[in-house]
Structure formats: C-alpha cells, structure tokens
C-alpha cells in the first residue's frame, strides 16, 4: 500500500521537484502510471489537501488546499510540524495520531488520522481533515518521510454530530426506559424514563454496577447471564428485567439487550431498550386470579354448566353436570354433546338452539333433555350463550342450566291433579259457580247448567248478579259476593236463580274467596245445593200445619194436651 498507492506516487513527485525541501517551485505535476493515456496530473487540481513531512515530523511541503485550511485557522505556515497540526485535537487523539505517524515512518501499512483545524475568526467554519499517512522511500528503500493525503470531512462530521445529538435527545426523551452498561457492567446510559420509573436519577446510577446495585439477589444470576451473552455478541429479545425502585417497589421491564459497538466494530457494552410492563403484569395477575376464581365458581356452582367448541365437542363440564348425569368430566370432554348425550327425538331441536348460539343468537330457558349414565332422563332448563375469544370471535357455546327434573315431575302430578279436580267439579252432584274480580262468570259446572238450563258457554263472561239473579235479591247477593272478594267468606246463604225457562231455583251456597299462589284475590267460588224442592216441601208442611192449627182451634169438641209432667200444654202440631 505504501509502495503502490496514490500517496507513494505523489511522494516521488515531491522528491523530484523539491528534493525533500519546501520551495516556491511551479505547481507539481506527476507523469504517472495513474492514467493509462500518459497525461500529466496536476496535483493541485486534485482538490485534496496534501502534506509532506520528514521522518521527524517536520512538514516540508503543503499544497494550496492544505494551506487554505491552515490560513483560516491562523496557523503559522513556516517551521510547522505534524504535532502542530494536532494542537486542536484532544490529548487522546493526539497520542493516537502521533503513534500512527510513527508506524507509517516505520513502513507499516497506511494509517488514517483526524486533524481538527479551528478558525480564530467568529463565523468561520471549523475544518476537520482525515489524513491518510503513507511512508516515502527512495530507490534503496530508505524512508525519506511521510506524505499525508487528506479528505475534508467537515460537513460529514457536522452531520454526524447532528445525528448524534438527535439520537442522544431521542434516547433521553424516549417514552421507554433505556439504559446502557460498559464491558464491566457499569451503567453508562440512563434515560429520563428509566429515572422516572425507578426513582433513581441519571447522576445516581452512572458508574454503578447495574446488577449488584439495582437487581435483587434472586434475579441477579439470570440478568447477569443475559447481559454477559450480549457482551459476547448475542442479543436477547423480550426478557423480563426486574428492577427495584428507590422506595423498594418492584418494576417489571420487558427488555431487548443488544451489544453496543464502537466505530471499529468492537463490543464496548450493552444497550437495553425496554417497556415498563409493571401494570400489565399486575393486570395479568389480577385477570389470572379472576379467571381462576371464575373457574372455581363455575366448577362448584349449584347449577349444571357445560360448554362446547365450534364443532359441538364438549370442553366444559362442571361438577353439578357430572352429578346429575353420572358422567364425569373426563368421560365427556371432547365428546360430541348432541350425538352422544341427547336422544334422537330431541337432537334436531337441540342442534338448532346450539347452532343459533354459534351464530351469535342466544337462547333463554329452553328445555334441554339429557340422559344419565343409567339411562334415566334429566330435564335441564338451559340458557345457551355464545362464547367468544378476546378478539370477539365465536369459539363455542356455554350453557348454564337448572335441573328441573323434579319440577317437571311435580308439574305432571299437578296437571293430573288439576285434571282430576276439573273432572270432579264438572261432574259434581252440586252446582258450582265462580266469578272473577269483576263479578263475571268464569266457572259453571254441569250441575249448574242442569238446574238453570243455561250452558257454560252461555253464561261465561256475563255478569252473574245482573243477568241471573232476580231483582229483589240482587242487592243481598251482590253484598255477599263483594264481601267474599274482600276475603270475608259466607256460609249457607240462599242464592235464588231464574232458570232459562223463567222458573225460580233456590240454591244454598257457600261463597269462598278464590286466590292465586301469591295470595292475590282472583274471584269467588261457590259450591251450592239445590234446595228448591226442600223449600217447596217446607212451604207445604207450613201450609198443612196452619190448616191443622185452624182445625184444632175451630173444632166442635174440646181438645187439650198435657206434657210429660202431666201439665196442660198448648196443643201443637
């Protein structure tokens, strides 16, 4: 590189023109093998800052581009050394540049150094030169000095500086905790968000051992392993990084740990970008607890609960469902509910209800007939509800039911009893009538129809007192019925009807308040006895007695009577 590069060609040209010394000779030309057409190359026209120095670092020549940069910085051009060029560099970069200069003198490969030229006048832009140093040798291989070919990187450095500042600001103001450590594990980066969530300021943590100072002992091994892997070049994504705040609270950070490289590609530390998931973790823990509680509630509920997936296979079966059917959870899980546990006659209706639920249409209170392990039938009153995942997609059906087997049996018995009572009422050998709360007929048995001549259809819905009681008794009968509607029942009151043919029928009636299961008054029910003939017989007896009384009183013979004690009594009949 030192022998064949551009630097060696230019160095030879300088030797030919100036014999190793700086003069005011005409512009340097090189008849070089740099161009195949053999044309001369004017070094001044290259537009690159070029310098030549002897092995001791004394500068023997500067081209016009280099001189222009030095002029702006008011640097003396005579008796200038390589060290003088580095006066604006940092101490560290000066030492590195001088070392590279010496390496180039010793014939090593080309070295690159940065030279900062700061102008003394305000408003004049500073220059940054990147010099490529190559050794100059004669034909015998003796080192004559160094030639440096420069590249003005002023604008490039400014852009790098701007980008660096932008990145620094971005890191510091990012809404995510960002930290960095060096190769020894000491903190060298700590942005505002990291300070905010931990309570430790940047000044407090810089230079501190991250793992030892801010990670609890139980997690140190795991965290150190991840950071050590990053220092070996192995990045780690999304590992939970537990930090503890200044007040001792735990902060969960989901972190990406990335090796941090310098400009030469060497690992100089680890850079971590995280996300504070403390609240998310707490929420997930709470959701897990709630989910576990709900699971427990479902499993121990005193109601049968089952679930199916979108294929109709059982994926939920609580203890009550197992208890009333005799099938354990293990036996039914994954089985097809309808095909396996519903009798053929009900499969179509049950499938329809479950299909509706799988399409988002819930069904309330439908009778769901299951069959027990022993073959007996179980009646379940069920609500079928669509089951959805977190994104709202339908994943199945959950059913919450009530075992109504005993109730259905009771209803059947009540229905039979009601039918028997209905038959008893209709066929009773006594007239039975009923009215609603408005006094309209709603009960009229066969005997009532027989003695009045009115059929049940003819009287139902008509006002009993207005339409079927003679005028002289309407007030009395209405009073008795009104009292019964108020809960004051009456026994054995005479209830006179007018038959369809216009005859009078005497009924001795008990008026009983009629109530629903909640105790609300619905009307009056009357059970009676036709006493028409009895009343007629009593009237006949009274007539006969009156006739006998008159006969005794007017008889043409003395008539007397005595009691058991021998005393005379009034003759009676």
Image (cartoon, rainbow, N blue to C red):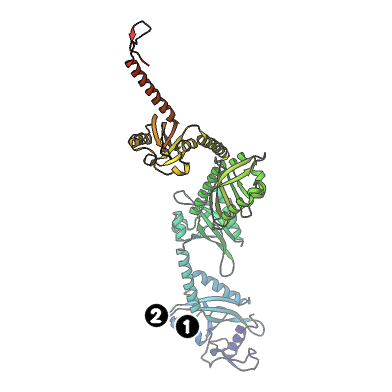
What is the secondary structure assignment of the residue under circle 1? helix
Residue 260, position in %: x, y?
56, 64
Residue 555, position in %: x, y?
34, 15
Question: Comparing marks 1 and 2, which lies closer to the viewer?
Answer: 2
Q: Is residue 155 visible?
A: yes
Out of 80 and 275, give the one closest to the viewer. Answer: 275
Q: Is residue 521 visible?
A: no
Outermost residue on the top side: it is 566
Where, quadrant-wise, is the C terminus in this rendering? top left
Label disc, if present, on residue 241 of the rendered structure:
none
* CA distance separating discs 1 and 2: 15 Å
Name above or below for residue 503 compared with residue 218: above
Which residue matches tag 2? 123
Residue 68, position in %: x, y?
47, 85
Which residue matches tag 1? 69
Name above or below for residue 255 compared with residue 500: below
The answer to whether residue 227 is left or right of residue 558 is right
Q: Earlier in the sequence, mark 1 or mark 2?
A: 1
Name above or below for residue 109 compared with residue 237: below
Outermost residue on the front side: it is 556
Instruction: Give the crowd class for mark 2: few <14, some 14-19, many >=20 residues within 10 Å.
Output: few
Out of 247 and 48, give the one closest to the viewer. Answer: 247
Out of 45 and 472, give the one closest to the viewer. Answer: 472
Instruction: Give the crowd class for mark 1: few <14, some 14-19, many >=20 residues within 10 Å.
Output: many
Residue positioned 37% across, 23% down in the render: 543
Name above or below for residue 286 compared with residue 436: below
Quarter of the figure with residue 196:
bottom left
Where, quadrant-wise, is the N terminus in this rendering? bottom right
Quarter of the figure with residue 478:
top left
């Amino acid at each position: 590189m030192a022998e064949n590069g551009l630097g060696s060609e230019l160095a030879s040209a300088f030797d030919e023109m100036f014999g190793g010394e700086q003069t005011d000779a005409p512009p340097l030309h090189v008849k070089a093998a740099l161009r195949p057409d053999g044309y001369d190359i004017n070094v001044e026209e290259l537009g690159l800052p070029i310098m030549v120095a002897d092995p001791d670092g004394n500068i023997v020549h500067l081209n016009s581009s280099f001189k222009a940069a030095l002029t702006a910085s008011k640097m003396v051009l005579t008796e200038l050394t390589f060290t003088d060029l580095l006066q604006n560099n940092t101490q560290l970069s000066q030492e590195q540049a001088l070392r590279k200069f010496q390496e180039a003198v010793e014939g090593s490969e080309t070295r690159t150094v940065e030279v900062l030229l700061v102008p003394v006048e305000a408003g004049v832009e500073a220059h940054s030169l990147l010099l490529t140093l190559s050794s100059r040798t004669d034909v015998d291989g003796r080192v004559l000095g160094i030639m440096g070919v420069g590249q003005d990187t002023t604008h490039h450095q400014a852009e790098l500086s701007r980008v660096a500042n932008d990145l620094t600001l971005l890191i510091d103001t990012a809404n995510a905790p960002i930290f960095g450590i060096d190769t020894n594990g000491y903190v060298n980066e700590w942005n505002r968000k990291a300070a905010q969530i931990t309570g430790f300021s940047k000044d407090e943590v810089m230079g501190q051992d991250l793992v030892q100072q801010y990670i609890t002992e139980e997690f140190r091994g795991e965290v150190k392993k991840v950071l050590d892997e990053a220092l070996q070049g192995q990045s780690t994504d999304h590992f939970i990084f537990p930090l503890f705040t200044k007040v001792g609270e735990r902060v969960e950070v989901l972190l990406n740990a990335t090796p941090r490289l310098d400009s030469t590609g060497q690992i100089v530390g680890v850079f971590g970008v995280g996300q504070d998931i403390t609240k998310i973790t707490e929420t997930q823990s709470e959701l897990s607890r709630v989910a576990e509680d709900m699971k427990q509630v479902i499993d121990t509920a005193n109601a049968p609960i089952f679930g199916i997936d979108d294929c109709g296979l059982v994926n939920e079966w609580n203890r009550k469902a197992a208890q009333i059917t005799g099938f354990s959870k293990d036996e039914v899980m994954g089985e097809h509910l309808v095909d396996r546990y519903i009798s053929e006659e009900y499969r179509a209706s049950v499938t329809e209800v479950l299909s509706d639920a799988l399409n988002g249409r819930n069904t309330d209170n439908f009778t769901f007939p299951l069959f027990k392990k022993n073959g007996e039938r179980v009646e379940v009153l069920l609500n079928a509800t669509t089951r959805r995942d977190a994104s709202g997609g339908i994943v199945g059906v959950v059913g919450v039911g009530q075992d109504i087997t005993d109730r259905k049996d009771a209803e059947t018995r009540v229905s039979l009893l009601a039918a028997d009572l209905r038959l008893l009422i209709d066929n009773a050998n006594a007239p039975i009538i009923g009215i609603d709360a408005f006094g309209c007929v709603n009960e009229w048995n066969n005997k009532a129809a027989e003695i009045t001549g009115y059929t049940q259809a003819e009287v139902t819905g008509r006002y009993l007192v207005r339409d079927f009681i003679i005028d002289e008794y309407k007030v009395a009968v209405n009073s008795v019925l009104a009292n019964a509607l108020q809960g004051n029942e009456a026994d054995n009151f005479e209830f006179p009807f007018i038959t369809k043919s216009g005859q009078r029928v005497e009924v001795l009636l008990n008026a009983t308040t009629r109530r629903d299961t909640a105790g609300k008054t619905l009307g009056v029910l009357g059970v009676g006895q036709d006493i028409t003939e009895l009343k007629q017989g009593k009237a006949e007896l009274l007539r006969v007695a009156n006739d006998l009384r008159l006969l005794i009183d007017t008889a043409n013979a003395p008539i007397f009577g005595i009691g058991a004690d021998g005393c005379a009594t009034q003759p009676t009949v």
